[in-house]
Amino acid sequence: MFQCPVCGQLLEALTNVHCMTLHQATKREVIERYGPPKYVAPVINREVQRWLREVQVMIRSSDFDTPQLAARHPGRSKR
């Protein structure tokens, strides 16, 4: 991720759209005035990692069987 040198917003890439929309300058002008965007490596602490493990939901192929059958045979619904 990159950090905008003007506003500090985290971005996948510094773009002309971001620069023109928020700073009324082209990407080249922003870099000339404020320097290049800073690369920021995202870090996940242990608490966040633990939370991610706890909230993950296992999806099995059988979870898709009934909806797939219903989509293939729309007139055959259970009543």
Image (spheres, rainbow, N blue to C red):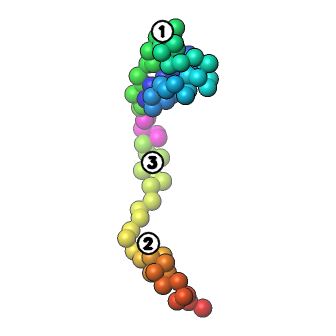
Q: Sequence order check: which comes first, mark 2 or mark 3?
A: 3
Q: Give the range drawn in magenta.
A: 44-48
Q: Quadrant of the N terminus?
A: top left
Question: Considering only order in the chain, which callout, 1 or 2, is on the residue closer to the N terminus?
Answer: 1
Residue 7 lies in quadrant: top right
Question: Which residue is depicted at the point 46% across and 40% down?
Answer: 47
Measure the C-alpha gap from mark 2 to mark 3.
22 Å
Residue 16 tag number: none
Q: Quadrant of the C terminus?
A: bottom right
Secondary structure state at the residue bearing disc 1: helix
Q: Work out which residue is located at the far top of the displayed protein and give it.
A: 33
Mark 1 closeness class: few <14, some 14–19, many ≥20 residues within 10 Å: few
Q: Label 1 sits on what residue type?
A: Glu
Q: What x and y, as percent, mark residue 22?
A: 62, 23
| Residue 40 occupies quadrant | top left
User: Which residue is denoted by mark 2 in the rendering?
Assistant: 63
Q: Is mark 3 on a helix, strand or loop?
A: helix
Q: Residue furthest bottom?
A: 79
Query: Which amino acid lies under the numbered mark 3 shown in the image of this protein?
Result: Leu
On residue 32, which mark appears? 1
Q: Using the image, determine if residue 47 lies above or below residue 28.
A: below
Considering the numbered disc 2 on the image, is that residue within a helix, a strand or a loop? helix
Q: Name the residue under label 3.
A: 52
Q: In this view, does 60 lie above or below 56?
A: below
- Quick check: is 45 in the magenta stretch? yes
Tell me which residue sits at (43%, 45%) in the image.
50
Q: Residue furthest left?
A: 61
